[in-house]
Image (cartoon, helix red, strand yellow):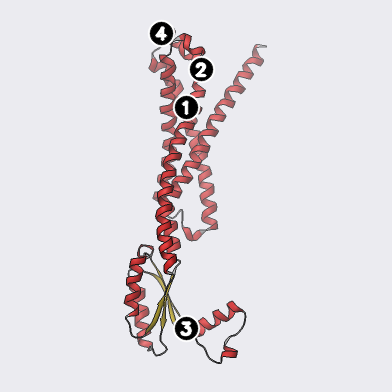
Amino acid sequence: MGASFEKFQKRRLISSYFSVVLSISLVLFLLGLLGMLVLNSKKLGDYFKEQIPVVVFLKDTAKEVEITQLKQSLALADYTKDAVFVSKEEAAEEHAATIGEDFMEYLGDNPLQNSIDVRMRADYVTPEKVEEIVSELKSKDFVDDVVYDKPLIQKLTDNVRKITFWVLVIAGLFLLIAVLLINSSIRLSVYAKRFTIKTMQMVGATKQFIRRPFIWKSIKLGFFGAIVAMLGMAAVLFYINKSFPELKLIEDKVMVGAVFGFVFLMGLFITWISTFIATQRFLNLRTDDLYY
């Protein structure tokens, strides 16, 4: 009878520890992913900004030397990510492939123009800076026109600011929720042993002596919870990086390491402070209050 009761108690204890570790790992996992989103929100915004082309259309009378000089100046400009020259013949082939027929057969001539597709660095993709660059390009005699999606740049700039702000707000709220949830799990774990705490105190054990094993046990649970959370984060980041390599989410090793380090330290810190507060509460309770 005694052996079976002891086994039942051990199973219940293991189940309690498992639930605490699971809750800690899930909360830290979501917190870590949200942290990665916060830190990469600018990178994601920059990626979409750099996909917006500025097309410089050249006049048919433009000389080869003028085109070459413009290509070189664009390639060396601080604002240029890349610049690709597209001849009118290449443009005609692409257009024909898009519409599914050779439009030059019934037009008899190629109405398209030579052009240079310029993709700018994200820091320069703002309505004011792009307009300044476009005005400079239009001032050249051999440039016929410069075309870009102005409404899209304006909308993208505004949305990136809004999204960054709200992601930060949500991250702050989620951090608070994470602290509360982990604290609740730890408090329930300590609550189950409140009579043991009070018994040790009644036989003369100091508060520090009583708290120590509870704190170390919780730190161990926080350690395992953080490890599980980091493994989950690593799997998700690996999958995203493999599916969308152009985002380069794991290229910045320092940033990724900082997020993983933050998750690990949060797992240890929250469990430590929660256990300290929970044990302190039961140490200060009167014996009669333990039953309520």
Residue under circle 3? Answer: 87
Q: Nearer the viewer, mark 4 or mark 2?
A: 2
Amino acid type of the residue that numbered disc 1 sits on in the rendered structure? Ser
Q: Quadrant of the N terminus?
A: top right
Amino acid type of the residue that numbered disc 2 sits on in the rendered structure? Lys
Residue depicted at 48% across the width and 29% down the height: 220
Q: How many marks?
A: 4
Residue 193 is situated, as x and y percent measured from the top left of the image, at: 51, 17
**First reached walking from the N terminus: tag 4 or tag 3:** 3
For residue 138, what is the image quadrant?
bottom left
Tell me if label 4 and label 3 are in contact, CB under 8 Å: no
Q: Cα distance, mark 2 to mark 1?
A: 13 Å
Say if 90 sits above or below 124 in the image: below
For residue 84, what is the image quadrant?
bottom left
Residue under circle 1? Answer: 218
Say few, some or many: other residues with alpha carbon within 10 Å of mark 3 (under 14 / 14 to 19 / 20 or more).
Answer: some
**First reached walking from the N terminus: tag 2 or tag 3:** 3
Residue depicted at 40% across the width and 86% down the height: 59
Residue under circle 4? Answer: 204
Q: Cα distance, mark 1 to mark 4?
A: 24 Å
Circle 1: element type: helix
Amino acid type of the residue that numbered disc 3 sits on in the rendered structure? Ser
Amino acid type of the residue that numbered disc 4 sits on in the rendered structure? Gly
Residue under circle 2? Answer: 193
Q: Nearer the viewer, mark 3 or mark 1?
A: 3
Q: Cα distance, mark 4 to mark 3?
A: 90 Å
Circle 4: element type: loop
Q: Nearer the viewer, mark 2 or mark 1?
A: 2
